[in-house]
Image (spheres, rainbow, N blue to C red):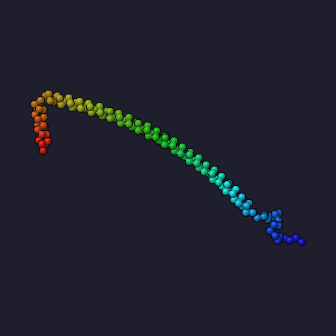
Amino acid sequence: MNDPLPTHAGSHDTQAGFVPAPSVSQAAHDLRVAAEEKIKDLAGQAGVLKDKALESATQFREQAAEKAIALKTSASEKAAHFREVAQEQWTDTRQRAREVHTTAEDYIREHPTKCVLGALGVGFLIGLIARR
């Protein structure tokens, strides 16, 4: 009669689904292979992340350059506008100063005595204030 249960470890029936226990060196080899595969997977993921980071940095740099150009253009336009307004105001101020100067000259020519006496009075007051 056949013995349904073997009595020693080396007599497992592989057709019945029994697999001999792996040796320690085989287990170490399998673990090493699995670790190498995991390292390769992680390296691939790191490469993908690196590529994404570079792509994001490139997009950020391009957007920053576009914003800088837009800001420069806007600032140039505003500076030109301010320059025009300042030039117009300077021209108006110079014209008004000429008119005031002409008016003052005309008044002095028409009333020289009043102007000289007024200048003496103002000079006298400034002298009194300066003495103190």
Could you tell me which quadrant the N terminus lies in?
bottom right
In the picture, residue 87 is in which quadrant? top left
Name the image quarter holding the C terminus.
top left
What residue is at 82 percent from the left and 63 percent from the top?
15
* Relative height, residue 115 to residue 20 (above, below): above
Residue 52 shown left or right of residue 21 in the figure: left
Q: Is residue 2 left or right of residue 39?
A: right
> Is the residue 57 above or below the residue 23 in the image?
above
Find residue 111 and report its horizontal and vertical position in percent: 12, 30
Identify the image quadrant of residue 102: top left
Q: Position of residue 42 (x, y in %)?
A: 63, 53
Could you tell me which residue is drawn at 78 percent across and 64 percent down? 20
Point 12% across, 39% down: residue:
127
Question: Would residue 26 appear left or right of 105 to someone viewing this image?
Answer: right
Is residue 1 shown left or right of residue 47?
right
Q: Find the residue positioned furthest to the right.
A: 1
Residue at 18% across, 31% down: 104
Count of marks placed on residues: 0
x, y percentage for residue 129? 13, 42
Q: Where residue 94 appears, x then y in whole percent?
A: 26, 31
Along the viewing direction, whichever of 84 and 131 lies nearer the viewer:
131
Taking depth in this image into account, of 28 and 48 the one nearest to the observer is 28
Considering depth in this image, is 17 or 107 the residue closer to the camera? 17
> Between 34 and 59, which is closer to the camera in this rendering?
34
